[in-house]
């Protein structure tokens, strides 16, 4: 019987939220279709993550354990994914849509003769696989159908909610034989430079406070960062705020930056240009703070505050602190 297989990415020693979101959706489809639900973990110490997956109702877990998988390098990851695919023979294999997966999805599809549908906002199996993908800077939603199986899909963060199953499972564990000769590597990863280690990761964040050109100086930047810290949120930025030199390029949200869909997106001094909206339109609740009542961001905002961010942010920070203190 065919299998629905979900790739689980590991970050900071645990399955990422975006992986668990995809796994939850795959479980819903697998239960409905009476198909086994499988997950796979690629990690030098993959066994450690079995416990974390049990509550999600998986029937089988494929593990690839190898030192070459300690950091993301395309060659070993691709070889390991191919080994898992051959072992599981899934009808559908789904991934969270991350930079790392973007790097390997097409190559994997070519190796295993599958269709690849990247960066989808939703997907269905009927039994053909149909997906909805935002295209043209999210101005248009394209419905696409794969003509045959197997199909590889990568799913945007926030497209589904991660939820444990009603009953946990005791999954069958399959150790996938894997050998990799590191001497064939033509590139090695020497160092990963992160902007700020104490900040919440943008693509995993439940709340994002994003700064635009309206945040014009260090004082404004500090207000944005303070609000984010108080809310346990990640900081993001528009391209204009990055070009002004206030935020690193890794924080850019939009067509040429990261695509995010947190539960709460607070846009501070952002006009709502289509290229920015392409990266955040999937947010559940959007709060816009802008001094221009006609700013296009208000067209997609759930709540709008018209006013000067330098006056509004201190009030918001104070209120959040008051609520947190329970007074
Ligand atoms: C090919 C291409 C790709 C692009 N990719 C991206 C991308 O990935 N991400 C991205 O963000 N942009 C991208 N852009 C740029 C995009 O077109 C916009 O220029 C950019 O998003 C504007 O950023 P902004 O809203 O911060 O600045 P602006 O459009 O200048 O808006 C600033 C806003 O701040 C408000 N404001 C000013 N002062 C205050 C204050 N004191 N209090 C409150 N509000 C205030 C203003 O009313 C205004 O609405 C791209 C452009 C191109 C051509």
Image: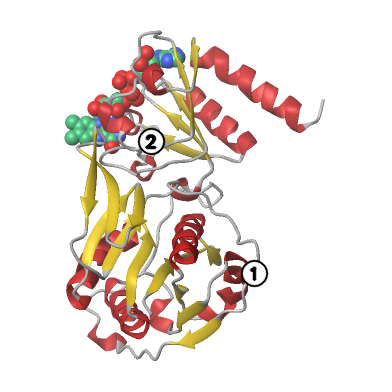
> x%, y% of residue 287?
49, 24
Ligand 1's quadrant = top left
> x%, y% of residue 290?
43, 15
Q: Nearer the viewer, mark 1 or mark 2?
A: 1
Q: Quadrant of the C terminus?
A: top right
For the point 53% across and 47% down, the residue is 200
> x%, y% of residue 98?
36, 56
For the point 26% across and 65% down, the residue is 105
Q: Quadrant of the N terminus?
A: bottom left
Q: Which residue, given by chain and number where applicable, does mark 1 sit on? A: 168
- Residue 261: quadrant of the picture: top left
Give neighbour class at mark 1: few <14, some 14-19, many 20+ (Cα, 10 Å).
some
Q: Secondary structure at mark 2?
A: loop
Cα gap from disc 1 to disc 2, whole angstroms: 33 Å
Q: Which residue, given by chain and number where applicable, does mark 2 sit on? A: 280
Q: Earlier in the sequence, mark 1 or mark 2?
A: 1
Is the CB of mark 1 within 8 Å of ligand 1? Answer: no
Is residue 189 visible to us here?
no
Name the foreground residue: 45 vs 169: 169
> x%, y% of residue 187?
25, 74
């Amino acid at each position: 019987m065919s299998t629905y297989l979900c790739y689980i990415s590991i970050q900071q020693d645990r399955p990422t939220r975006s992986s668990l979101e995809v796994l939850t959706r795959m479980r819903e489809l697998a239960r409905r279709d009476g198909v086994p639900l499988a997950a796979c973990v690629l990690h030098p110490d993959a066994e450690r993550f079995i416990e974390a997956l049990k509550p999600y109702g998986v029937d089988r877990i494929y593990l690839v354990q190898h030192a070459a998988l300690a950091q993301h390098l395309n060659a070993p990851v691709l070889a390991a994914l191919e080994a898992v695919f051959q072992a599981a023979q899934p009808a559908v294999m789904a991934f969270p849509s991350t930079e790392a997966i973007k790097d390997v999805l097409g190559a994997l599809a070519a190796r295993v003769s599958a269709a690849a549908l990247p960066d989808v906002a939703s997907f269905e199996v009927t039994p053909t696989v149909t997906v909805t993908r935002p295209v043209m800077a999210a101005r248009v939603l394209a419905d696409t159908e794969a003509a045959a199986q197997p199909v590889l899909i990568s799913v945007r963060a926030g497209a589904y909610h991660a939820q444990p199953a009603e009953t946990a499972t005791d999954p069958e564990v399959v150790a996938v034989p894997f050998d990799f000769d590191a001497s064939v590597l033509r590139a090695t990863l020497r160092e990963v430079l992160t902007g700020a280690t104490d900040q919440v990761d943008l693509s995993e964040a439940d709340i994002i406070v994003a700064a635009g050109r309206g945040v014009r100086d260090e004082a404004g930047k500090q207000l944005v960062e303070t609000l984010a810290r108080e809310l346990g949120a990640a900081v993001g930025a528009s391209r204009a705020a990055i070009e002004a030199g206030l935020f690193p390029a890794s924080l850019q949200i939009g067509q040429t930056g990261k695509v995010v869909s947190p539960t709460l997106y607070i846009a501070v001094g952002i006009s709502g240009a289509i290229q920015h909206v392409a990266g955040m339109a999937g947010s559940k609740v959007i709060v816009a703070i802008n001094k221009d009542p006609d700013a296009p961001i208000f067209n997609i905002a759930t709540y709008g505050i018209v006013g000067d961010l330098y006056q509004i942010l201190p009030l918001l920070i104070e209120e959040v602190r008051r609520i947190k203190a329970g007074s």
